[in-house]
Image: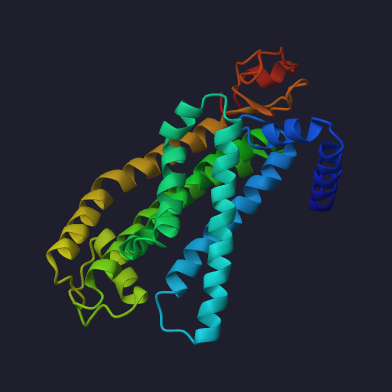
């Protein structure tokens, strides 16, 4: 389904809602259902994923001195994106099967942490200092990637390689959060960290344990962040890489057998029923044995 067809479907359903039909509500419920395998959900999540990246880029760019007009345009763009994130969160909350489970889930907490500093910052300006938390939304890429692999007709070797991208996303988020914290804590106190680029350089050199020493934190909290970054790089980063490699080999061992009911394509090499809906799947005799057996 193309993007144009997707938006045509949305407009037609919206027209039905105006005239009292409930199909639009059903479509929205399906759209905000993470377990749905519909392709339009992949289109929607792709849009959200792109907006997440744009939002993080805007945060970084707005830390620099910019011409007033450009700064205003970027700030308005950022505000629109945060509004869309807020609307998405409210819709997911409204259509969630268990709202308490959604609110207490990792992604639910992440969404709240990324939108609260913007809205409450209007009344409590010091909360704007926590806008770096929006980088946490990048973790949602991992969920998007996993669901994309379940919905899409992609080659298994390509699916296996995508799992490596999950490790890259995780490392990028950790470094971005570290750089953001260092910039918030050190800017104005450390002449060596005048821009976000300086903070990013320090975060990367700390996470990779290179430690050239040409830039170093001077505040107590800044040094604490640097210390935590080193500890995380020793522990969590190897863990995420190992997890991604394990997922790589799991996908490499899967076989291509399209479920006639829900459309799930990849299944374990010895599976006889779809793990998503329980429907019996049609298998070729050769598919019951892994390729490397």
114 displayed left or right of 175? right
Instruction: Tell me the residue at 74%/41% (across/down).
Output: 40
Where's residue 102, x and y in %? Answer: 48, 31
290 and 163: which is toward the camera: 163
Toward which corner of the image does residue 95 lie, by quadrant? Answer: top right
Q: Quadrant of the C terminus?
A: top right
Toward which corner of the image does residue 192 lie, by quadrant? Answer: bottom left
Would you place residue 157 above or below residue 59 in this image? Answer: above
Residue 176 visible here: no
Instruction: Tell me the residue at 50%/85% (across/down).
Output: 68
Where's residue 166, x and y in %? Answer: 48, 46
Where's residue 291, x and y in %? Answer: 61, 28
Farthest residue toward the front?
123
248 displayed left or right of 4? left
Q: Quadrant of the N terminus?
A: top right
Where's residue 241, x and y in %? Answer: 39, 44
Instruction: Tell me the residue at 29%/65% (across/down).
Output: 203
Residue 235 visible here: yes
21 and 46: which is toward the camera: 21
Colouring mode (rainbow / by chain / secondary structure / one colour): rainbow
Would you place residue 284 above or below residue 27 in this image? Answer: above
């Amino acid at each position: 389904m193309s993007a144009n067809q997707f938006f045509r479907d949305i407009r037609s359903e919206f027209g039905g809602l105006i005239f009292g039909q409930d199909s639009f509500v059903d479509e929205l419920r399906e759209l905000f259902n993470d377990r749905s395998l519909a392709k339009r959900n992949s289109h929607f999540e792709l849009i959200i994923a792109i907006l997440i990246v744009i939002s993080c880029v805007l945060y970084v760019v707005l830390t620099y001195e910019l011409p007033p007009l450009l700064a205003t345009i970027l700030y308005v763009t950022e505000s629109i994106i945060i509004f869309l994130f807020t609307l998405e969160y409210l819709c997911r909350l409204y259509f969630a099967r268990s709202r308490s489970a959604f609110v207490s889930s990792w992604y639910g907490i992440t969404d709240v942490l990324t939108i609260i500093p913007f809205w409450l910052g209007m009344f409590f300006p010091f909360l704007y200092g926590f806008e770096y938390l929006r980088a946490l939304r990048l973790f949602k890429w991992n969920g998007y990637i996993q669901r994309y692999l379940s919905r899409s007709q992609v080659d298994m070797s390509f699916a296996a390689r995508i799992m490596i991208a999950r490790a890259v996303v995780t490392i990028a988020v950790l470094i971005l959060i570290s750089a953001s914290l260092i910039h918030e804590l050190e800017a104005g106190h450390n002449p060596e960290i005048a821009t976000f680029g300086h903070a990013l350089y320090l975060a990367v050199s700390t996470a990779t344990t290179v430690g050239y020493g040409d830039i170093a934190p001077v505040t107590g909290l800044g040094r604490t962040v640097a210390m935590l970054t080193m500890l995380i790089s020793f522990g969590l980063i190897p863990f995420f890489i190992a997890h991604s490699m394990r997922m790589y080999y799991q996908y490499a061992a899967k076989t291509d057998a399209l479920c006639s009911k829900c459309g799930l394509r990849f299944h374990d090499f010895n599976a006889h029923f779809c793990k998503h809906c329980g429907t019996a799947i049609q298998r070729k005799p050769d598919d019951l044995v892994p390729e490397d057996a």
